[in-house]
Amino acid sequence: MSMNVTFWGVRGSIATPSPDHMKYGGNTSCVEVNVNNRVIILDAGTGVRLLGECLMRRNLKDYLFLQSHTHWDHINGFPFFCPIYRDDVSIKVMAGHLSDLGGIKKVLSSQMCQPTFPVPFAELAAKLSFEDFRSGDSFSLGDGVFIRTAPMKHPGGGTGYRIEFEGKALCYITDTEHVIGQPDQDILDLIQGADLVIYDSTYTDAEYPQFKGWGHSTWQEGVRLCKAADVGQLAIFHHDPSHDDKFMDQVARDASNAWPNAFVAREGMRVEIKSESFPNKISAVR
């Protein structure tokens, strides 16, 4: 048995459809996890549009969205996720930061209201359900798939996820800010011993001081956390829009030199978390 992870969007803040961003990709946050015949989608950034088309070609019609938070770059692909217009599709959306703010359904529907979007949320054909929880909760999805969560340090709040199945673990830790010299204990506890951690690496350590308070972290902090928590591999994720392919190539070299188990996530990359021990298998979807 294995857990397959596919990156459909790896960019942060805003999509970057530029020739200088082709190698690593310009779509915003969206990661597909296939585990025990279940499709779990981490965030609905612009990358979710391509994922939706792929899911229809694969004739898969039942999905779970786990939202880290609901800033635009993590939800603005949802109205373009073609399965929501199919009446033979079932979709559940969960979030852990909106219980006191009206819930995840309110946020997703509000971005599809006039005058900002032409199709009303009420006209979506899919069987949609929504569930709000509180960051820090844990829950079972059944069939041996278990989810643990933790709060992220980000303006407006956010949620980190740990997906566990048959002794394997994937963690999705994005849009969180660290304090220099003070490792985040919530994150350390969540990622402890995980096979793969996808981490908010918007900035480098050199850049970070000028963006303090913006709610993001660095690839170097990701390495420090993963080494401290005995993690198998680190996926550097949520690339800043100003970081073009040349910049990201340098990040890839620096990160590999700092810790060989770190790699830069690219749009179209697939990671298979295998039943046997590390290393995992990395390939390309297209």
Image: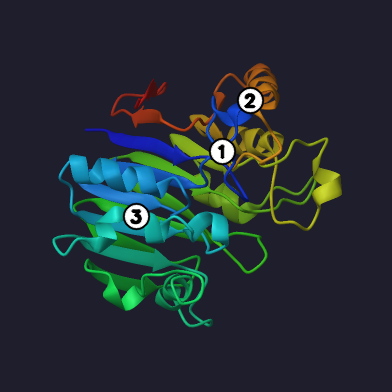
- Residue for badge 3: 81
10 Å neighbourhood of mark 1: few (<14), some, or many (≥20)?
Answer: few
Task: Measuring from the top left, give residue 244's x and y in whole percent.
Answer: 67, 30
- Which residue appears at 44% of the width and 45% of the height? 47
Contact, CB < 8 Å: mark 1 with mark 3?
no
Label 1 secondary element: loop
Contact, CB < 8 Å: mark 3 with mark 2?
no
Task: Measuring from the top left, give residue 93's x and y in whole percent.
Answer: 35, 65
- Which residue appears at 37% of the width and 37% of the height? 5
Is 246 positioned to the left or the right of 230 in the image?
Answer: right
Is 71 positioned to the left or the right of 109 in the image?
Answer: right
Q: Amino acid at mark 3?
A: Phe
- Residue for badge 1: 17
Vertical side of 270 occupied by 153: above or below: below
10 Å neighbourhood of mark 3: few (<14), some, or many (≥20)?
Answer: many
- Residue for badge 2: 245
Task: Decide which of tag 3 and tag 2 comes sooner along the chain.
Answer: 3
How far is mark 1 from mark 2, CA to CA?
12 Å
Q: Quadrant of the N terminus?
A: top left
